[in-house]
């Protein structure tokens, strides 16, 4: 434990300031003024001050533990990503694979929390989340293979270094196809609108979060904010050269572009049913990713 | 002022229950969220679960079937919770005062903080009601 550790930790946490952008852009698309910039932080602060209710028949330990499980995984992955991107840490061999594993844990925490809360609607939401997880993991993994094949490395710092020297993965045919697949699977990973079947507010209240209140709900909201800052950077590192550019302004602009793409997809699409979402991921997006992998193996 | 209370005033999440209303108040409540009135400016969001709510919005004249349900909901809500009676029916039963099916007022069942009269109340009145309730919390 030294000063640098805390500095880096602070930097990796503070990036969630980009989350309010999502709500503001949403409001502007709908011709509204929208909430003030501090709205998400006010929401969090309020939730941390409220009463925690635990359902009578729930499995209490799992109910309390689930949100923290997701948060710890996200903090670790965010720490690794930002240290590599902002402070040029070399990372370790296979950190890409570790990252892919860590990104499934927030979904798992949602599933565990939903099943632990002994509410029929929560269980329904959790089972939907499992189906969605089965759906989007396949195209996601296939698409992540493309930068691995092109750069010949499973180490983030080498992937980024390769892209600085030879141009971004995104600018090749296979790279752009895989980029589309990754964007849509990450959209489902974050539980945003076309794929928010698990939390469908108009159908099953709030899905797995139905029984959560107060600080525990706040942690789940925080997970969502963290995902909104970490996953775009993951996509950026794999496909668009990370924060490798010398000019920090261009780096931030690239980051914001990806965030705004997520928000635009969210605001211009209706919610899919879970069977439609599965069909989309397995029979459309997986095919696109597979074609991208084959093209990448062919060197395109 | 307490920091937690200050945050609460900045993001009141509203849960809405209809206790046998004619749907008019419910439609006006949805109006508040449309771009014209844009209640999200004040952090007001409609939530799906009572466990997430800070404001319990009751519409309708409280018929017999709804009395135990509303009691249940009030007990399930995480405190502090603000109860708003929306519309003439829930303020004092309105034209259903002599009905066989509306034996009690809303405020006989749960403690009401703010009354917003009107049949239906205008969206401006609803926003004003929520703001007054928040003032009361301070």
Image (cartoon, coloured by chain):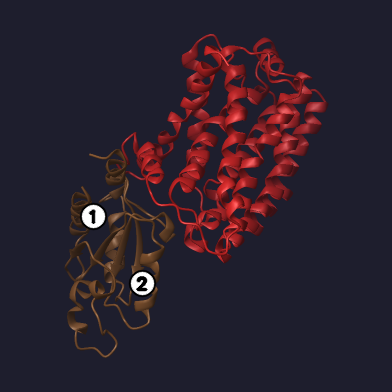
Chain colours: A red, B brown
Q: Label 1 belongs to which residue? A: B130
Q: Residue sitting at 52 percent across and 18 percent down? A: A6
Marker disc for residue B71: 2
* Number of disc labels: 2
Q: Secondary structure at mark 2?
A: helix
Q: Is residue B75 left or right of residue A247?
A: left
Q: Residue sitting at 59 percent across and 46 percent down? A: A65
Viewer-proximal residue, A58 or A281?
A58
Q: Secondary structure at mark 1?
A: helix
Q: Residue sitting at 74 percent across and 43 percent down? A: A138
Q: Is residue A86 left or right of residue A177?
A: left
Mark 1 vs mark 2, CA separation in Å: 21 Å
Mark earlier in primary sequence (1, 2):
2
Q: Residues within 10 Å of mark 1 (few under 14, many from 20)?
A: many
Q: Nearer the viewer, mark 1 or mark 2?
A: 2
Q: Which of the 4 image quarters holds residue B116?
A: bottom left
Viewer-proximal residue, A218 or B20?
A218
Where residue A113 appears, as percent x and y from the top left, is 59, 52
**Residues at discs 1 and 2 both on one chain:** yes
Q: Which of the 4 image quarters holds residue B60?
A: bottom left
Viewer-proximal residue, A193 or A50?
A50
Q: Residue sitting at 25 percent across and 63 percent down? A: B84
Where residue A148 appears, as percent x and y from the top left, is 76, 25
For the question of whether residue A113 can be seen, the reply is: no
Quarter occupied by the C terminus of chain A: top right
In this rendering, is residue A79 above or below A212? above
Where residue A230 appears, as percent x and y from the top left, is 56, 30
Chain under callout 1 = B
Viewer-proximal residue, A9 or A63?
A63
In this rendering, is residue A242 above or below A195? above
């Amino acid at each position: 434990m030294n000063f640098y550790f805390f500095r880096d930790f602070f930097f990796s946490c503070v990036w969630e300031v980009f989350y309010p952008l999502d709500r503001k852009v949403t409001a502007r698309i709908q011709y509204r003024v929208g909430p003030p910039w501090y709205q998400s932080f006010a929401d969090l602060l309020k939730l941390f001050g409220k009463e925690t209710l635990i359902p009578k028949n729930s499995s209490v330990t799992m109910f309390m533990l689930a949100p923290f499980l997701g948060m710890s995984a996200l903090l670790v992955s965010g720490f690794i990503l930002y240290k590599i991107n902002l402070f040029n840490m070399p990372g370790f061999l296979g950190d890409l694979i570790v990252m892919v594993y860590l990104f499934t844990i927030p979904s798992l925490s949602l599933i565990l929390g939903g099943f632990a809360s002994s509410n029929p609607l929560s269980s329904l939401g959790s089972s939907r989340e499992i189906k969605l997880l089965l759906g989007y993991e396949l195209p996601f993994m296939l698409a992540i293979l493309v930068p691995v094949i092109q750069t010949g490395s499973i180490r983030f710092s080498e992937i980024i270094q390769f892209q600085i020297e030879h141009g971004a993965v995104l600018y090749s045919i296979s790279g752009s196809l895989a980029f589309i697949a990754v964007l849509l699977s990450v959209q489902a990973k974050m539980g945003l609108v076309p794929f928010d079947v698990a939390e469908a507010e108009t159908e099953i209240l709030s899905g797995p979060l139905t029984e959560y209140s107060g600080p525990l709900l706040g942690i789940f909201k925080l997970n969502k904010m963290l995902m909104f800052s970490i996953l775009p950077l993951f996509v950026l590192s794999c496909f668009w050269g990370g924060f490798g550019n010398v000019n920090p302004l261009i780096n931030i602009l690239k980051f914001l572009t990806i965030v705004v793409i997520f928000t635009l997809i969210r605001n211009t699409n209706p919610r899919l049913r879970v069977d439609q979402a599965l069909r989309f991921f397995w029979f459309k997006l997986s095919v696109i990713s597979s074609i991208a992998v084959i093209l990448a193996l062919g060197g395109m | 002022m307490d920091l937690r209370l200050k945050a609460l005033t900045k993001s009141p999440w509203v849960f809405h229950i209809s206790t046998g209303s004619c749907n008019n108040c419910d439609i006006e409540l949805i109006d508040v969220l449309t771009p014209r009135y844009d209640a999200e400016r004040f952090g007001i969001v409609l939530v799906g679960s009572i466990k997430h709510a800070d404001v319990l919005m009751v519409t309708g004249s409280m018929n017999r079937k709804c009395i135990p349900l509303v009691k249940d909901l009030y007990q399930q809500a995480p405190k502090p919770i603000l109860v708003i009676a929306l519309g003439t029916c829930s303020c004092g039963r309105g034209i259903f005062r002599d009905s066989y099916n509306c034996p009690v007022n809303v405020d006989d069942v749960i403690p009401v903080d703010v009354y917003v009269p009107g049949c239906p109340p205008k969206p401006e009145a609803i926003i004003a009601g929520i703001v007054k309730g928040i003032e009361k919390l301070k």
